[in-house]
Image: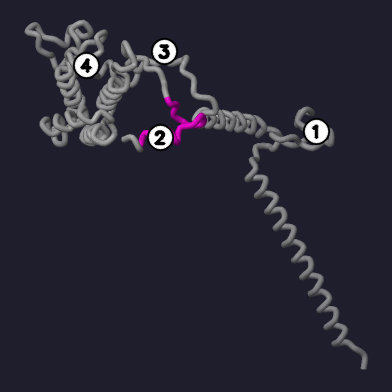
Amino acid sequence: GAEFSEAIKFLQSSTSVLPSHQPWVGCNGSSSTFRGYPCGLWTTFHTLTVNSMDGPKLLPAIHGYIKYFFSCSHCSQHFQTMYKEDKGETAIKVPDDAVFWLWRAHNKVNKRIKGSASEDPKHPKVQFPSLKNCPKCWNSNSEFNENEIFSYLKRIYAKGAISFRGTESILPPVDNRQARLIDTINNQRKAEALIGADENVKGPSKLPKEQKNSDGQLLKGATWGFNNTDISLCVMLYGLSTIIIIGVYCMVLIRRKMRRKKFLELHKLP
């Protein structure tokens, strides 16, 4: 763990794709020690189970992530034990089974850690969803209505329900590779759009004057829809054609001379 952390710090730089820190929005706790990453994981996992069509493969992937990549070792061990006891490997027959399995697992974890040092005092652990957030999810005898639970989970974790509120002010780091890559793609698209706009131009005489320099040469961009590869290929074909023509011409001249020489030898005076 420590060696891996040091390796990450060594690789981290101002040009890295992933910044060293981003503020939490939906999972922001009352202090930096609460909620945050674990809350983000649960949110991600619920979103995956609701939107995935391959539940039998998804749940083992979630289990593998917690087993090998979650830094809280005892949390990881508890999850692995629960996964084994609840038969996570074989309990999923259809995609909807994964939705319910993870929901039940989440509530088991909430019940286990309620009142522990990891509980945010301003966000106490309750059975999810709470009566306040989903009154229809609870029956009159204080038990869950699983039909309503399923509809509720499908609704709040659906693709269209993802909110980006509060993320507008989050900026990428300076010289971020991802930001530069996006800029490069956008610039390339703009260039392609400009080239596409020139496709209807028939010849240099119809180009606007501002697309020529003082010597009458076309400026970059006035290429009638040709890119650098096309131009290079045309130049190569032009050169090859020129060489072939010259070669044929030379062969014709040589054959003419040979025929003339042969004719003179045949009709040479005695």
Residue at 85% across, 79% down: 260
- Looking at marks 3 and 2 on the same chain, the residue that comes earlier in the sequence is marked by 2
The tag on residue 102 is none
Q: Amino acid at mark 3?
A: Gly
How crowded is the residue under tag 4: few (<14 C-alpha within 10 Å), some, or many (20+)? few
Foreground of the two, 262 or 18: 18
Q: Residue furthest bottom?
A: 270
Q: Which residues are magenta?
A: 4-20
- Looking at marks 3 and 1 on the same chain, the residue that comes earlier in the sequence is marked by 3
Work out which quarter of the rendered image holds the C terminus and state it.
bottom right
Mark 4 or mark 3: which is in front? Answer: 4
Residue 263 screen position, x and y as percent = 85, 82
Mark 4 or mark 1: which is in front? Answer: 4
Residue 60 screen position, x and y as percent = 22, 35
Mark 3 → mark 1, Cα distance in angstroms: 49 Å
| Residue 146 shows up from this direction | yes
Q: Secondary structure at mark 4?
A: loop
How crowded is the residue under tag 2: few (<14 C-alpha within 10 Å), some, or many (20+)? few
Whether the residues at callouts 4 and 2 have beta carbons within 8 Å, the answer is: no
Residue 120 screen position, x and y as percent = 25, 12
Residue at 29% across, 34% down: 69
Q: Which residue is mark 3?
A: 166
